[in-house]
Amino acid sequence: MIEATGLRVRWPHTADDVLAGVDLRVDAGERVLLLGTSGSGKSTLLRALAGVVPQQVDASTWGDVRVAGHRVLSPTAPGAPAVPTTTTAVLARDVGTLTQDPWAQLCLPTVEDEVASGLEHRGVPRAQIGRRVREALLAVGAAHLRGRRTAELSGGEGQRVALATVLAARPRVLLLDEPTALLDPAAATAVAHALRRAATGRATLLVEHRLDEQGADEQGADEPARRGTDEARSDGGATDGQDAAAGLPGRVVVLGPAGRVLADGPTADVLRDLAHDLAALGTWLPWWAELAAARVRDLADLPAVAPARAPDDAPVLLQSRDLVVRRGDRTAVAGASLDVRAGRVTAVVGLNGSGKSSLLLALAGLLPAEGVVRGARPALVLQRPEQQLLARTVRDEVAWGPRRARLPDADARTDAALAAHGLTGLAGADPFRLSGGQQRRLAVAAVTVGDHEVVLADEPTFGQDRATWRTCARALRGLADAGRGVVLVTHDVRLVAEVADDVLVLRDGRVLAHGPVDAVLRAGALPRAGLPLPPAVRAALADGRPVAAVLGALAARVGEHAVAGVPA
Amino acid sequence: MTAAGRDVAPDAGADRVDADGRADAPVVDVRARRGLTLSELVLLAVLAVLFGFLYWALVQAWAALQIAMGPFGDLAQHVLIGGWMVVAPLAIYIVRKPGVGVVVELVAALVEFAFLASPVGPMLLLVGLVQGVGAELAFTLTRYRRYGWWVFVASGVTAALASTLLGTVRYGWHLQDLFALRVGLQVVSGIVLCGLLARVLGDALARTGVLDETALGRERRARRAAAEVPA
Amino acid sequence: MTTAGRTAPGPTALARRDPTVVLGTLLVVSLLLLVPVDPWTPGALLVAAVAAARAGGVPWRTLLRGAATFGPFAVSVLAVNLVTRPGVPVAHVAGLTVTDVGALVGAGLAVRTLLVGTLAVVVASSLDPVRLVTSLHQRVGLTSRAAAALLAGHRVLEQLPARWVAVRQAQAARLPGPRPRRPGRLPASPRLLGRAAFTLLVVTLRQAQQMAVALETRGVGSGPRTVHRPVPLGPGDGVLAATALGVVLLVGLVTWRLGLLETWGTVGR
């Protein structure tokens, strides 16, 4: 179904290849997981297979690519550059593509029109469209959304509708580019299940960070799971009789930083044998492979030292009492009281729509609210950092706040912040040109450069690979350790467990639990709010020692071996 | 959007032959299509929406300025007129194909009146057409090959004159005392708020990288590469 | 914000008609309205339009909103014409001379502004974007790619108000200094507003690029397309167009017979 030989891709006017000779063959009915570090060309590979590169995105290409019987890229002569020989649109009659952002994929005002549009443009006779729309929505557990307006869908609903639009056309090949990256855990699990059901009989190439959730039980989804019990085996994957790679595609392909295939084989084998190399590449691993990367069988084998944290009676920098936030005629937050203390990280957790972002905006004074908020004006790092950009260069961006506050040492502070966040080399670049990870570092630098006592961050680890995630977590903990108060709004339970001191759990705008992080985790408040505990956190809780200490020790050990194990 | 957006030579048929896997089929680059690509059409539609929205906001500013200017409030439109035409030269600067200035003004007018409701009503379609043609004229005369500052100034002037002509027909400006003043204000506004602003905006947007996959982005990239490696 | 993002048509009679016919009729009517410059012809039509809109189920609220929006323009058009038209002086106000022709033409253009504004509000409140684009595809040969692009544009329009607020909030969060005195009140300095508008432009154009790729990978323009929910063209559409044009011509005929009709060619003679 997919046949790529010697595929090379190079961006215009650059010297290095993004993909430097990739050979890949995927047969009908086969599911393949594509792993690799950020910038290793995973997305570029999917986009080249879909024809988007080089048709909609300029690039120079070499090699021979055939997908679903179409000649996608053909060399003009042996060894010469290859040109696209099937338009993306024609290719789309047999190839379905799903990307991470539902808002960039939904193009029509209602769900039914959205799903139907994929059929209309592929010329499906009118008489069949209604039935196929209903079937496709049913297949992704979204039958009840048919009459809804796209603008009113949540992220998870939007992504399922986007998937239905893809499936309605009955593609023979599915190209899935981090389809769950922007979803909360419940929605991610539901979409992962819908994707697994959809893969039957198709060639599927999946890029995905959230490996633990691929195999998780469908929790909080509105349709009971209909999984086959022997699904992992039916994929043709060798699972060694163990349940380890259950839910994951049977085969994994690893792309290295130089744009070449590093490994290609049965998922369980590759993940086990290359665990520490994969960790070094900065990719996420399923829990059991992470243990393998740390070269321990059990967390008890790790020496854990509880990190030094500020005491729970440290000075209060920002305080809210009985905060009520209304948005339109809906009560988004129904009475939240919170103390942000110097040197401590408070996590506000809940599913999307639980009111946590409204609470954050109210704490920052950006939404009108009833109740009391006392304290300094906090700095705020939002989910989409590009919306916060104010200047034309990275340097001016960081200097913007200090200059506006007329700080005498604005230039010195700016230089220090740029250096601390690895941005010195990018100082002259346009901030909009940075990658997602770089933009987030810029947002943090632009916050830390000022005198804000309190820093609020909205989903700071959204959709990131392991390496970027780790950098971000460290930066946030560093802010607190330097004496600031930090509030994280997130549904990333692992982040909460590793860096937070206190946690406030929200469900439907109400506070479900509030207290020190270990106590709240042990009380089971997160699953009640719809946030299942990832296996790493479950294991750390079972270990009995402080959760942050255990996970910190694991991260240190994985990092140690990862550094030692970097392939030359 | 019809004329300029008409699909050119749907290549489905040819591809179907290839789909059967004939290895000896000639290698034909499918990028070589005339007319506007889907990416360009979506870019134009979104530009039209954005500027239709901004134009509509400008109408509210117009109302405020009108009231502030008292009995001469009707002249406020001449001060602002250039701002209502800026999307045409901007779109041409980015896409560099004939007709896009007219198309984008027409769609912006449709958005402004059909979805946001404007006091000018459906006449906006005619206004958009005339203004688009006026703004595009300067680029047509240079065969869509020159994008120096003076072409944008000329575009502002032609747009303002076209718009004046229409106003004269609609409101009988030529019968009024203030005709010369009206024309003068329109031309100045056309040069500054339409021509020059379009060039400034286009360059600022290109810097951010969002226009990399457009004719403007490609040209800037090639120029930068040429500057780095002197041939 | 009048109708941005509000696209579900109300249960008005107009919402059931073919959108291309509605827009075409409206365009022709407003072209015809260029002819008279006296207040009587558009005045009579304004009364007829309001009556027809009420009969068709358009709420008073929509009509009054139109009047409130377009009232200032009408007043302004009246004011400037009063004092800038040559004719017989009838009054002197603050050093300016009001003429009879100025009063007549000013009133005529002001009532025309109100009439066209009312018609525009009524049509905008009853127009469904998908039906409009489908109808343009069926009736006037809008290509499938152009239709898809227009609908993508409409999605962007729907999200624009919320995104504008989000960008302003995001940028306001960067401000140093004490807490805002009134929570929720965003800074409105021209520089910050300009910067927010630019950021809005950039993030929206980036979304446009992603949507274009999404549409490509959905097969838009890959060959002949079908239409899931075609917009029917019925006798009601003909009746609508004929009635609207007939009423305009009839009113024009009556005012002409009564000697009230004035055009640019006759006014001031």
Image (cartoon, coloured by chain):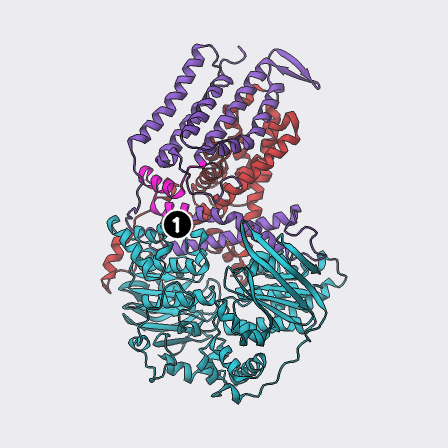
Q: Residue at x 75, y 64 (%)?
A: A409
Chain C on-screen colour = purple
Could you say whether the residue bearing mark 1 is in a helix, strand or loop?
Answer: loop
* Residue C219 pos. (x, y %): 33, 54
10 Å crowding of disc 1: few (<14), some (14-19), many (20+): many
Residue C102 left/right relative to C122: right
Where is residue C225 drawn, in percent x and y?
29, 48
Horizontal arrangement in the rendering, residue C182 relative to residue C37 (left or right): right
Q: Extreme bottom residue here?
A: A301
Dot 1 corresponds to which residue? Answer: A110
Looking at the picture, does residue A108 appear above or below residue C63? below
Marks counted in the figure total: 1
Segment tinted magenta in the rendering: C124-151
Left or right: residue B103 versus residue B75 is left
Where on the picture, by quarter, is residue A315?
Answer: bottom right
Chain A representation colour: cyan
Is residue C52 at all visible to an observer of this figure?
A: yes
Residue appearing at x 50%, y 28% in the figure: B166
**Taking B168 as reference, is C144 above or below it?**
below
Query: Is residue A130 highlighted in magenta?
Result: no
In the rendered image, the quadrant that contains the N terminus of chain B is top left
Chain label for disc 1: A
Q: Position of residue A59 (x, y in %)?
A: 43, 62
Chain in red, by letter, is B
Specify the farthest residue to the right. Answer: A408
Residue at 47% of width from left, 64% of height from top?
A182
